[in-house]
Amino acid sequence: MRAYERLLKYVVVRTPSDENSSTVPSSPCQFELGKILVEELKSLGVDNAYMDEKGFVYGKLPATSGYEDKVKLGFIAHMDTVADFCDHDIVPVITENYNGEDFPLGTSGRTLTLTDFPHLADCKGRTLITSDGTTILGVDDKAGIAEIMTMLEKVISENIPHGQICVAFTPDEEIGTGASHFDVERFDADYGYTLDGDTEGEIQYENFNACKADFVIKGFNVHPGSSKDTMINASLVAMEINNALPSMETPRGTEDYEGFYHLVSMKGEVGEAELHYIVRDHDKLLFEAKKKTLRLIEKDLNEKWGEGTVTLTITEQYRNMAEIIETCMHLIDNAKQACENADVTPLVMPIRGGTDGCQLSFKGLPCPNLGTGGHAYHGPYEHITVEGMDQTVDVAVEVVKLYAK
């Protein structure tokens, strides 16, 4: 079975994680996909596959006889998707021999355009997979799951010699909590790769340092007709907070290694307001400086409007795994060689985000990230090509071969 065929099966099982939930996994639908994956692993010959009580799927393919001393290699992808654009059935759309031009997404009124997605020109002649434009597709990260499964199938059916191969499919990556419950010891790999990137051939080991920053503003609400020197409008104070941040340090104004403050959501009235940010930077010192800026804003506005007007809560999320991966750069060298062996151009680039591998690297499992062939994650413009998925499978197989030498 080809990887895209598996993807089509997985995406119709909706698995949005829920950041407001206190359960693990955060949504019961993730168990549904996990059960399917356990059965599929067993059908491939991974007889020890199972799902634990937290929704993590684990499995091991024992080393080929005589290869037991080789590196134990892990492959990881996540089962959950974002909750946005995931409130009704997902309908994948397959377009063969895509013409490389602007592509309307069904009758949704949305269009994949070359202006927004210039790489589409390079997809001309390929088979394009999208949603109907009303939902996400679920490529992030069900493409990674499909590619790992297909890699396993090829290794087994073609009798490719290998060390122990460990696989895991995780819940709740999109809300940043999945890896905290990952059992590294049970997984039993020396090194791992997540398949959770974009373009086929991507190799990523430098990710953002990340935190959340939540402001709660308490106003003082009195009748507007008699509020001279009395009223404190919490919504206006919230505007002061945002205006105090560097205007160009937003996702739209930054690229590559440049960090940002991203206002994710806000709500407010005169009496109370809230601002919710995520803060990112690859450079540790610049990341700490951003947090210092936020604390300074809290301090200054409390001095201006009264102590307790502004309350800032900073929640750490993940760190840049580069400091771990730089001690085992064979992971990157072998990934580059695997791409070349598979006739795929290696693209070593920073992650403008994070993966499970960020946290796993600091838990003792060095774990860079590989591309899946997908694009435009987290929205209705998500898409992938059949050929890109095939190439990613070939890269993963070549990685297995290299570590068996």
Image (cartoon, rainbow, N blue to C red):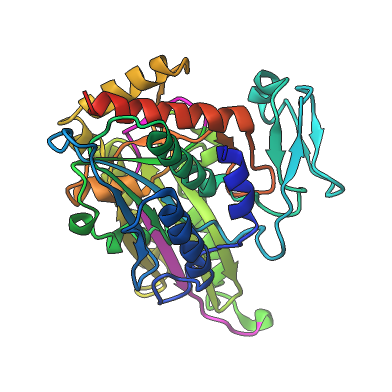
Residue 75, position as x, y percentages in the image: 34, 43
Task: Decide whether residue 404 is among the magenta residues.
Answer: no
Rendered-image quadrant of the N terminus = top right
* Quarter of the rendering containing residue 209: top left
In the displayed structure image, the side of residue 276 where residue 288 appears, left or right: left
Location of residue 379 with respect to 268 vertically, above or below: above
Is residue 295 in sight in this rendering? no
Residue 142, position as x, y percentages in the image: 53, 49
In the displayed structure image, the side of residue 58 where residue 269 appears, left or right: right
* Quarter of the rendering containing residue 353: top left
Is residue 47 in sight in this rendering? yes
In the displayed structure image, the side of residue 188 where residue 141 appears, left or right: right
Residue 390, position as x, y percentages in the image: 54, 30
Location of residue 64 with respect to 20 vertically, above or below: above
Residue 161, position as x, y percentages in the image: 28, 30
Residue at figure coordinates x 36%, y 70% from the top left? 54
Residue at figure coordinates x 42%, y 40% from the top left? 195
Q: For the magenta stretch, what is the residue range?
A: 199-223
Given residues 300 and 251, the one toward you in this image is 251
